[in-house]
Image (cartoon, helix red, strand yellow):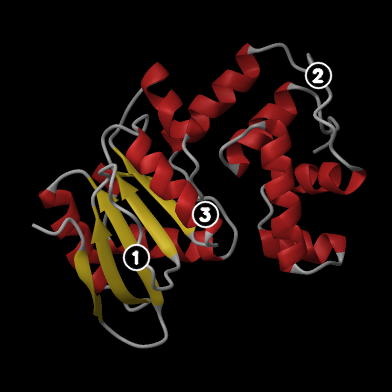
C-alpha cells in the first residue's frame, strides 16, 4: 500500500499543506479538518517512514503529528520542508517537565496541543506562522521560561559570533516581533530578515525562534531593556 495519499485540490488560491502522522486516525482526521478550512487549497499526507520523501510539488506548510519527535523520520521531513521554504507546524499531546524538551528542540515554526485542536485554532495557527509569528501553547512557553529563569542569567560560555545586524534581529525576535515587523524596524526586505533569522538560529544552535529568544535572555546576548 502506498504510504502517501494523492493531493486533493479543494479550492484555488489557498495554502497547500502536507501532513506527516504516524497513525491512520491522525492522518485521516487532519486531512479532513484541513480540507474544511477556507485558506487551504489542497492536502497531501505522508508517513514518517525512512524511505518516504515529501511530495515534489510545491507546498506551504508541513503539519507534523507524531508521538515520537526524537525519531529520525519526522525531523528529517521537517528539515527537508524548511529547506524548501515551507513552514512547519508541530502538533503534540499535552506533556509536562522533561517530556516537553523534545518539542522545544524540534525544528518547528509553530506548535499546538492536539487536545486544543479545532478548525478555528488550526486556521489561526496557519495564519500566524504565515505572518512570521510562532503560535505556542502556554505550557510550552512556560517550560521555556522556566529553563531561562532556572539557569544563570548572563552566563555565556562562548561568543556565538553574531554580527551587529544579527544581534539586532535577535533583540527584535526576543520582543516577539514577526518577520514583517522586523523588516519594518530594520528597513530591509522580509527575505533579508528571513536570512538573518536563519543565521541566528544556526549560530545559537536553536531549532526555532522561541528557543533562540530564551537562549538569548539566558546567555545575556540582548540588553536588559528588551
Residue under label 2, please give it. Answer: 158
Which is nearer the N-term, disc 2 or disc 3?
3
Residue on which disc 1 sits: 55
170 vs 10, left or right, is: right
Q: Position of residue 29 (x, y in %)?
A: 16, 57
Q: Say whether marks 3 and 1 touch (CB < 8 Å).
A: no
Q: Is residue 184 left or right of residue 117?
A: right
Q: Earlier in the sequence, mark 3 or mark 1?
A: 1
CA gap between label 3 and label 1 equals 14 Å
Nearer the observer: mark 3 or 1; the answer is 1
Q: Are marks 2 and 3 in contact (CB under 8 Å)?
A: no
Q: Are marks 2 and 1 in contact (CB under 8 Å)?
A: no
**Residue beneath label 3, please?**
82
Q: Residue at x 42, y 33 (%)?
A: 103
Within-10-Å neighbours for mark 3: few <14, some 14–19, many 20+: some
Q: Is residue 108 above or below residue 151?
A: below
Q: Is residue 200 left or right of residue 32?
A: right
Amino acid at each position: 500500500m502506498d504510504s502517501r495519499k494523492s493531493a486533493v485540490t479543494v479550492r484555488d488560491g489557498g495554502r497547500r499543506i502536507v501532513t506527516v502522522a504516524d497513525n491512520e486516525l491522525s492522518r485521516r482526521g487532519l486531512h479532513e479538518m484541513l480540507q474544511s478550512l477556507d485558506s487551504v487549497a489542497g492536502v497531501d499526507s505522508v508517513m514518517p517512514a525512512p524511505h518516504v520523501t515529501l511530495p515534489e510539488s510545491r507546498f506551504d506548510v508541513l503539519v507534523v503529528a507524531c508521538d515520537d519527535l526524537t525519531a529520525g523520520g519526522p525531523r528529517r521531513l521537517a528539515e527537508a520542508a524548511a529547506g524548501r521554504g515551507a513552514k512547519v507546524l508541530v502538533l503534540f499531546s499535552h506533556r509536562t517537565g522533561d517530556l516537553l524538551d523534545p518539542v522545544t528542540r524540534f525544528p518547528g515554526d509553530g506548535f499546538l496541543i492536539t487536545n486544543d485542536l479545532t478548525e478555528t485554532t488550526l486556521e489561526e495557527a496557519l495564519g500566524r506562522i504565515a505572518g512570521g509569528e510562532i503560535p505556542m501553547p502556554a505550557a510550552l512557553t512556560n517550560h521555556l521560561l522556566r529553563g531561562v529563569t532556572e539557569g544563570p542569567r548572563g552566563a555565556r560560555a562562548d561568543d556565538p559570533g553574531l554580527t551587529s545586524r544579527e544581534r539586532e534581529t535577535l533583540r527584535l525576535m526576543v520582543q516577539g516581533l514577526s518577520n514583517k515587523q522586523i523588516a519594518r524596524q530594520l528597513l530591509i526586505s522580509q527575505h533579508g530578515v528571513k536570512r538573518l533569522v536563519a543565521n541566528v538560529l544556526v549560530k545559537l544552535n536553536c531549532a526555532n525562534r522561541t528557543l533562540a529568544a530564551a537562549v538569548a535572555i539566558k546567555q545575556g546576548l540582548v540588553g536588559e531593556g528588551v
